[in-house]
Image (cartoon, grey):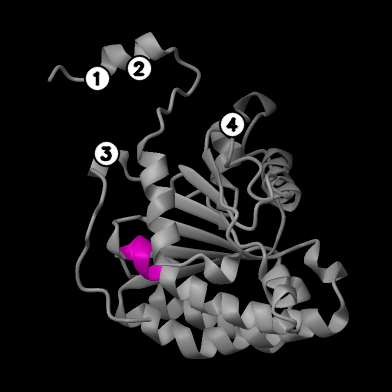
Amino acid sequence: MTEIVSAEIPVSADSRPRHVAIIMDGNNRWAKARRLTGVAGHKAGVNAVKAVVETCAREGVEVLTLFAFSSENWRRPQDEVSALMRLFLFALEREVKKLHRNNIRLKIIGDRTAFSPALQEHMEKAEELTRHNTLMTLVIAANYGGHWDITQATRKVAEMARAGQIEPSDITDSLIQQHLCIGDLPMPDLMIRTAGEQRISNFMLWQLAYTELYFSPVYWPDFLADEMREALRAYAGRQRRFGQTDDQIAARQPEQ
């Protein structure tokens, strides 16, 4: 990661997403097209991660969430899963200091209990090192699933009710949202999925309720700065209604 010292913003601040979430898809297909192993595709994808993190930080995005490893990915071949764990550990060891130098906070969400003690320890150290950084928050979703996230939040709320801290009538959307993995962060404005697939694959099911969706045909290792900026430009051209009509939206716009 290069040093991030300034921002070149192609769109106005009010049309820039505060939170971008990305499903990084296509590493295996990228590798297969080049007659390489799937692991080679995941390694190549690290360069795309660096490019997208740098671009989002420069463009003033406040939160970037990357879907690195889903709760369903354990079903993949064991050698690929093992290689992914090694790559994750390598990235934590090598890249976190660069994030810290660039004032980027790292937050890791998902069920950590399935990871090795060494990997869990590195996750905690990386988060602690960057805890007070303010330029951007980078969220890595690892062993994460939307069903799991809603379930764990609901369980916490149920425990509060059992302890007598709240009444059933106190349970609201807002209360449940507070206990989701990123309940302290703004909900995603833009969700990007690469490699041409058009589904969300159990990713942030609650959080994506009103998110703008952008599907790119580009495999993840080739989704670099230009592709990221194009996604931001596409978002800037969207009109977000949140259930309202065009006339209602127009009435809120200031006169020129």
- The front one of 34 and 189 is 34
Dividing the picture into quadrants, the one containing residue 76 is bottom right
Amino acid type shown at disc 1 = Gln
Q: Tell me the distance, in whole angstroms, between the alpha carbons under discs 3 and 4.
A: 26 Å
Whether residue 30 is visible: yes
Query: Quick one: quadrant of the C terminus?
Result: top left
At a point 35% along the width and 17% down the height, the residue shown is: 249
**Tag shown at residue 173:** 4
Point out residue 127 in the picture as x, y percentages from the top left corner.
Answer: 48, 75
How far is disc 1 from disc 2 in space, using C-alphas? 7 Å
Q: CA distance from mark 1 to mark 4?
A: 28 Å
Question: Given this view, does label 1 or label 4 mark the residue nearer the observer?
Answer: 1
**Separation of disc 4 and disc 2 at Cα?**
24 Å
- Please tell me whether the stretch drawn in magenta is mainly helix, strand or loop: helix
Magenta stretch? 53-57
Q: For the residues labelled 1 and 2, say whether their Cβ atoms are less than 8 Å apart.
A: yes
Task: Residue 129 in the image: state x and y as whole percent.
Answer: 41, 81
Amino acid type, residue under disc 4 in the picture: Asp
Q: Is residue 255 left or right of residue 93?
A: left
The residue beneath circle 2 is 249
Horizontal and vertical percent position of residue 12: 23, 43
| SS class, disc 1 | loop
Q: Is residue 208 above or below residue 240?
A: below
Crowding around mark 1 (Cα neighbors within 10 Å: few <14, some 14 to 19, many 20+) is few
Relative to 254, does residue 182 appear above or below in the rendering?
below
Residue on which the image places disc 1: 253
Q: Is residue 182 above or below residue 38?
A: above
